[in-house]
Image (cartoon, rainbow, N blue to C red):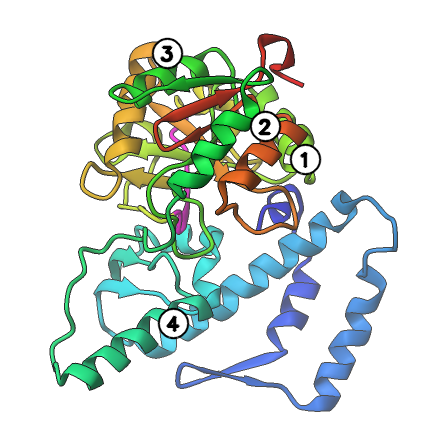
Amino acid sequence: MGLAAFGRADPVLVNALCQLLEVDRGRLRFAEAEEIARIRCLLEPYKRRAGAPVMEAADLAATAQVAYSVLADRVLASTLDEASGNLILTGGCALNSSYNGTLIGRGEIDQLFVPPCPADDGNAIGAALLAWMKETGETDIPFGGGSPFLGSRAKDGALAVCRQAVQGSLSVTETRGDTAGLVAQRLAKGQILGVMRGRAEFGPRALGNRSIIADPRGAATKERLNRLVKGREPFRPFAPVVAESDMAEWFEKTPISPYMAMALPFASQAKTRVHAVVHEDGTGRAQSVSDRIYPWMSELLRAFGRETGVPVLLNTSFNIMGKPILHDVQDAVAMLMTSGLDGVVIEDTLIEKGSSDHGL
């Protein structure tokens, strides 16, 4: 999805890819083996050469994204019929935020919801719920509040050990009482911070409790993050975090998007204010936050807005490319020491490099 924004779709290849699958009453069926072999031969010359720059594959990525959208439209058309109203998407393909964003504003869809863990990982929650209902004899599904934060917490003992271990080499500040205010000040000065607070998110998106956050205003922030912190290709985008109440100021479409499920077009007057989170096609995979689900992130947005006049933050997962999102205090501090991070926020403790280390 990220690379596709830099390319141009080839209509011949789009048509070929769409022939791979047939939509039959909402279900996908593969074409016959001979047809698949023919299409594979057609695609072979477009295969990325070993060692070639990844940007050479941008047109192929754009082609695949368009083909996916065509097929997804066919699935919806065969299942929605004349229905309208609210649509829930699940399954791994529901993570295609670029396509999801195009559904907003279509006549037959009023609202779109994608859970924070729509792929196979979400099956674990359903399996646990089913087992509980069988064990207890309950027939009504309980409402758990809708929080995506179902994972582990930072261990107090590990944090205490890390505090002691880094004394003298890193700066340690206890921020209890005004963590959001202090973090907002650091971000406004250009720091890039890792965050490990509360329970971890369940699902593939880092939603603020296991995130790397930064000031979105400068275009150089994206390059710095990708090269010195995440260790990944420069085309990869970052998510803008916006308060639900401010969505209309920043985006042309304003659905509730608490789990980064939709790439939405930025409002024209907003693009130049948050360069680091505007993708090549003018969209951003928005995360809209509310006090109910995201109390601390909402507080941080307000504090950052007071510091800068821009109540928007850059959010990306707390990891380096190819590694899982961090869950251990030791791993968080290790990433601080070995990457371009300026500091980490672990609960109400801020651990920072010396001023000479900022902006490695």
Of badges 3 and 4, the one in the foreground is 4
> Nearest the camera: 208 or 29?
208
Amino acid under disc 3: Thr
Whichever of labels 4 and 2 marks the residue nearer the N terminus, that label is: 4
Residue that label 2 marks: 222
Whichever of labels 2 and 3 marks the residue nearer the N terminus, that label is: 2
The span from disc 4 to disc 2 (Cα, nearest Å) is 34 Å
Q: Mark 1 Cα within 10 Å, few/some/many (few <14, many 20+)?
A: some
Of badges 4 and 2, the one in the foreground is 4
Residue that label 1 marks: 234
Q: Are marks 2 and 1 in contact (CB under 8 Å)?
A: yes
> Nearest the camera: 34 or 323?
323
The span from disc 2 to disc 3 (Cα, nearest Å) is 18 Å
At 80% from the left and 60% from the top, the residue drawn is: 46
Residue 124's disc is: 4
At 61% from the left and 35% from the top, the residue drawn is: 334
**Residue 233 visible in the current orientation:** yes
Amino acid under disc 2: Lys
Whichever of labels 2 and 1 marks the residue nearer the N terminus, that label is: 2
The span from disc 3 to disc 4 (Cα, nearest Å) is 42 Å
Instruction: Give the mark count.
Output: 4
The span from disc 2 to disc 1 (Cα, nearest Å) is 8 Å
Residue 165 in the magenta stretch? The answer is: no
Whichever of labels 3 and 1 marks the residue nearer the N terminus, that label is: 1
At 27% from the left and 45% from the top, the residue drawn is: 255
Residue 353 in picture, x, y percent from top left = 57, 17
Residue 85 in picture, x, y percent from top left = 20, 63
Residue 267 in the magenta stretch? The answer is: yes
> Magenta span covers which residues?
260-268
Against 136, residue 329 (above or below) is above
Residue that label 3 marks: 308
Relative to 242, 58 lies left or right = right
